[in-house]
Amino acid sequence: MKKPEVGVDVVIRKGDTILLHERKGNNNDWVWSVPGGHLEIFEEITDCAKRETHEEMGVSIKNLKVVQILNNIYKDIGKHYVTFYVDSEIANGEPKIMEPEKCRSIKWFKISELPKNLFSSFQKLIDTGYFK
């Protein structure tokens, strides 16, 4: 039997804004999301967050803290993730598109002004009331 995968999603803050990128979602639609990816074997959660953020946006982060763990089930595409959400602050670097085949734009958003088309796992974090 197949087992769930472990994901790490990273909320990057700068003042009252968070950094999102517009990326391909599970159904190849374009959605806004925080950076993130798969936890590698023997990798610490915060190290994964740093690695994924650098790989996807070319920036460094600081003040990392695991803030939520959610069970994300996508029966329609046969995927199941246990996702760790890490809160952080931008440390240095200017965000840029590092994976143009997966991402088409990057933008800072005020939490009160997030776009509507959010990636489902990021929407689930919002639905927990984390940003209130």
Image: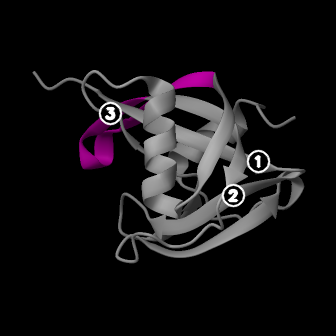
- Position of residue 68 measured from the top left corner of the image (x, y, whole percent): 62, 23
Which residue is identified by label 3? 80
Secondary structure state at the residue bearing disc 2: strand
Residue 123 seen in the figure:
no
Q: Confirm or deny contact between disc 3 and disc 2 (CB under 8 A).
A: no
- Name the residue furthest front: 92
Left or right? Give the position of 35 relative to 68. left
What is the three-letter code of the residue carrying label 3? His
User: Callout 3: 10 Å neighbours few (<14), some, many (20+)?
Assistant: some
Residue at 28% from the left image edge and 40% from the top image edge: 79
Asked which quadrant contains residue 129, the reply is top right
Q: Confirm or deny contact between disc 1 and disc 2 (CB under 8 A).
A: yes
Residue at 52% from the left image edge and 25% from the top image edge: 70
Reply above or below: 73 against 14: above
Q: Which mark is residue 19?
A: 2
Secondary structure state at the residue bearing disc 1: strand
